[in-house]
Amino acid sequence: TNHLRHPQLKDPSPLCNVPEEAECLTVPKYKRDLVHKLKVLRQELSQAQPQAGHCRIEVCREEIFEESYRQVMKMRQKDLWKRLMVKFRGEEGLDYGGVAREWLYLLSHEMLNPYYGLFQYSRDDIYTLQINPDSAVNPEHLSYFHFVGRIMGMAVFHGHYIDGGFTLPFYKQLLGKPITLEDMESVDPDLHNSLVWILENDITGVLDHTFCVEHSAYGQIIQHELKPNGKTIPVSEETKKEYVRLYVNWRFLHGIEAQFLALQKGFNEVIPQHLLKAFDEKELELIVCGLGKIDIHDWRANTRLKHCTADSNVVKWFWKAVETFDEERRARLLQFVTGSSRVPLQGFKALQGAAGPRQFTIHQIDASTNNLPKAHTCFNRVDIPPYESYDKLYDKLLTAIEETCGFAVE
């Protein structure tokens, strides 16, 4: 990735709290075209908005999920485009956007929570969500996915955000783009590596795979044929590309195709797919989720220190840098160190590492102060040399996250 450099690294962009509109994401140069594309999208969406009438929603906080579901699913498509007016029962408060924003924030927390069984975390160590293949334990699940799609579309249409991130391949599918082997890397790195190995090596006499894969569901091992009679068809040097393609498709859609189509239907009822042609999956993620609010106090309170103390310069300067960063840079620092720009729903105390809970860790190392800080995402740890000054730590930290981070929209 070739990121354009900020002309003046020491001058962080202004902090943008909760953007009223997606346009006011703090935007570095390389994202200017995203802002332009958003402007075009907003213009097209505003033409769809009826001049008269409101989309009125009144819910009580305790029953936000069920009540929102009942009301939103009763509405016709064009009702969802009307000006959004949300009221929490028993509370006075005119909705100038703030109540709708809070409603979407609280509602997305509920509907995306793995506890309800519609979604699950894609991996134990990263808090991106994917559709739960076992969601059918709720007989109404397809109707709920239709609802989730509508809510995601309403958030985009009305310039608000959903609080929760999906895997990038999910956004790719939402855009109607084909899934490739590269998409597997972020979701299932082990499977990705073994499929890459199959493609890059002569497998004659080495592998005895057939066009049949095993997976566990409801606690049982189940076999799935990737094509008719796949169990009897061996994978050969000639057929391995087809095997990998079918495997990747199956891995992303097995057990979730009906759920995904219901969600996509709801989303496209509010945001027609052709309006999103200009966007890639990373841009769609920013449009749907924003950047995720990061609570610095919670972050600090749940950080472990290794070979340093709270009074060490490295630690004091690290937090000073974090405080001067805008939301986007904080999100990118978090992704640099933990692999995800999202914080789990329970906050920093629930951060997971490769093997169970693992707090964010600042580790002062004995290394040349010409080196950049180094991240170990499986341990949620950043290694920082004993820099001589705050300015040097700030510059080195910024360079590390700007240059080694895939979070930016390329």
Image (tube, rainbow, N blue to C red):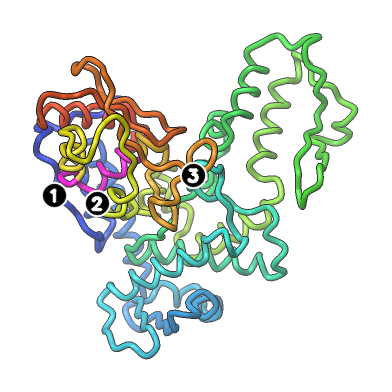
User: What is the secondary structure assignment of the residue under circle 3?
Assistant: strand
Q: Quadrant of residue 2?
A: top left
Amino acid of disc 3: Pro
Residue 378 - label: none
Work out how far the residue at label 3 is from the one at label 2, CA to CA, in angstroms.
Answer: 32 Å
Asked whether, in this view, residue 164 is left or right of residue 368, the answer is right
Q: Note whether residue 129 is visible.
A: yes
**What is the span of residues highlighted in magenta in the rendered image?**
323-334
Return the disc, 1 or 2, that comes first in the chain's sequence: 1
**Most foreground residue, 377 or 327:** 377
Which amino acid type corresponds to the residue marked 2 in the rendered image? Leu
- The residue to which callout 1 is attached is 14
| Relative vertical location of residue 132 with respect to residue 194 in this rendering, above or below | below
- Mark 1: few/some/many CA within 10 Å (<14, 14-19, 20+): few
- Label 2, secondary structure: give it: loop
The label number, if any, that marks residue 25 in the structure image: 2
Q: Identify the element where label 1 is drawn.
A: loop
Please report whichever mark, 1 or 3, sits nearer to the chain's N-terminal start: 1
Quadrant in which the N terminus is drawn: top left
Percent x, y for residue 389?
10, 28
Rendering quarter of residue 160: bottom left
Q: CA distance from mark 1 to mark 3?
A: 34 Å
Q: Amino acid at mark 1?
A: Pro
On the picture, is 251 further left or further right than 311? right
